[in-house]
Image (cartoon, helix red, strand yellow):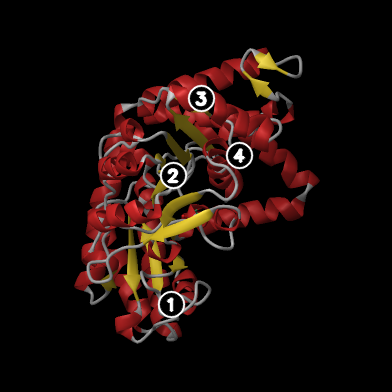
């Protein structure tokens, strides 16, 4: 707190334009509801660790084996981050240096595959990620991706179909994980498929890491060769990522991260990761993750109760996807996202399974509860938020309806202060 506020005080004088933008962002996040399921609000302790002079250091290499001097305290930080992450997930080996989720996934491809090798990944429009084999991403351009999809009727993953597809495709790796699939993933079933076709199993749990670490979702670590996660979503740490793997892959993974892909680690981020992992090891964090799931169910119920249709008809995790199609709004995701934004309800437009439109003008709205749960909101607030969302979606060009929803949201947010004590943001 002391460090953070001291720095804010200084920047307000030296760079008023940037300070003004920081201040306005502070007001935006306090006045609205943040429902983008990949976002969260870190603790003050995480912010403090992040805003330190560790940003100045170069420390290529790994603890005890660096290419620069003066790394004794960087080693303390990195070792603590590694030990805490290992404990959190029960992983044999952890690399905490990846700058973010995409580079972490890239490092796994470098470590396990050769260029051009075949792998299977979850179709992006049904809930995968760009790095799971999209044709516009390195993973789809430089490797041969055979995408698997959800069942068209149920919109659920069908493990028998994936097994059949894997037997035909004979991939070297199968990538499990999600960014917009609202149900649980059976990592054990993926392991069985991988064993059957002699493929590596790589899980990307960026979205659900917190739920996996606290027993609210199956933990993929026992069923995978490699697992990656970002650290800034349900895990509630700074923007970044980690890679966990079996000991047999440790050397290949470490070499792929550095020197294969990255340069010096971001030591200030790694300090903040260590702080977040310590927080995630506390009993309160498990309660927090439990409330994320309860809130997601309550929000889904409110949305459906107000006439909206959800992909798969609900949620088992922290997120859900509204289908705009039955509201006559196919391809209007962008307009709906903007209308909700005007009401201070922050969501993102998203494709739906077998999307009838385009990723830029898709037919879905993705939303989730990690950030509003951090703020302390519970089931009764979800009911109000669901009603506001449904009203705006039903009248997304009606300024009076948007204004009314905005006032209701503002009223709601008053009872849930964010970063109290950071007066500099007022
Ligand atoms: N951009 C992230 C998400 O929103 O899910 C994934 O990288």
66 relative to 160 in the view: left or right: right
Residue 29 rendering spot, x and y as whole percentages: 50, 55
- Mark 2 or 4, which is nearer the eye? 2
Q: CA distance from mark 2 to mark 1?
A: 50 Å
Q: Is mark 3 within 8 Å of ligand 1?
A: no
- Mark 3 or 4, which is nearer the eye? 3
67 relative to 125 in the view: left or right: right
Q: CA distance from mark 1 to mark 4?
A: 40 Å
- Mark 2 or 1, which is nearer the eye? 2
User: Which residue carries the number 2 mark?
Assistant: 173
Give the mark nearer the N terminus: 3 vs 4. Answer: 4
Residue 378 rendering spot, x and y as whole percentages: 27, 51
User: Which residue carries the number 4 mark?
Assistant: 99
- Mark 1 or 3, which is nearer the eye? 3
Give the mark nearer the N terminus: 2 vs 3. Answer: 2
Give the mark nearer the N terminus: 1 vs 4. Answer: 4
Residue drawn at point x = 45 percent, y = 79 percent: 357
């Amino acid at each position: 707190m002391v460090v953070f506020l001291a720095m804010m005080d200084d920047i307000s004088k030296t760079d008023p334009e940037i300070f003004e933008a920081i201040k306005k962002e502070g007001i935006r996040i306090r006045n609205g509801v943040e429902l983008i399921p990949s976002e969260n609000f870190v603790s003050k302790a995480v912010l403090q660790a992040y805003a330190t002079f560790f940003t100045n250091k170069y420390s290529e290499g790994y603890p005890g084996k660096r290419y620069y001097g003066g790394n004794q305290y960087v080693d303390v930080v990195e070792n603590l981050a590694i030990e805490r992450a290992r404990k959190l997930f029960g992983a044999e080996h952890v690399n905490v240096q990846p700058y973010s989720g995409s580079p972490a996934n890239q490092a796994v491809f470098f470590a396990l595959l050769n260029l051009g090798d075949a792998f299977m990944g979850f179709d992006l429009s049904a809930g995968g990620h760009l790095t799971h084999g999209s044709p516009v991403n390195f993973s789809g351009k430089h490797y041969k991706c055979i995408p698997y999809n959800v069942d068209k009727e149920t919109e659920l993953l069908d493990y028998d179909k994936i097994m059949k597809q894997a037997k035909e495709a004979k991939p070297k790796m199968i990538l499990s994980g999600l960014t917009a699939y609202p149900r649980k993933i059976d990592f054990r079933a993926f392991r069985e498929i991988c064993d059957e076709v002699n493929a590596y199993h790589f899980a990307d749990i960026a979205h659900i890491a917190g739920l996996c670490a606290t027993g609210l979702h199956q933990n993929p670590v026992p069923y995978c060769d490699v697992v990656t996660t970002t650290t800034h979503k349900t895990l509630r740490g700074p923007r970044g990522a980690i890679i966990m793997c079996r000991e047999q892959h440790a050397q290949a993974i470490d070499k792929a991260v550095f020197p294969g892909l990255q340069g010096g680690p971001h030591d200030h981020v790694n300090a903040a990761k260590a702080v977040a992992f310590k927080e995630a090891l506390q009993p309160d964090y498990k309660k927090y993750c439990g409330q994320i799931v309860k809130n997601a169910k309550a929000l889904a119920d409110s949305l459906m109760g107000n006439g909206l249709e959800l992909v798969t008809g609900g949620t088992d995790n922290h997120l859900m996807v509204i289908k705009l199609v039955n509201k006559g709004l196919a391809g209007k995701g962008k307009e709906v996202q903007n209308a909700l934004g005007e009401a201070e309800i922050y969501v993102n437009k998203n494709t739906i399974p077998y999307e009838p439109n385009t990723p830029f003008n898709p037919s879905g709205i993705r939303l989730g509860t990690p950030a509003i749960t951090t703020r302390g909101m519970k089931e009764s607030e979800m009911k109000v938020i669901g009603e506001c969302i449904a009203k705006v979606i039903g009248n997304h060009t009606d300024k009076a309806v948007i204004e009314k929803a905005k006032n209701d949201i503002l009223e709601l947010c008053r009872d849930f202060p964010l970063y109290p004590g950071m007066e500099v943001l007022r």
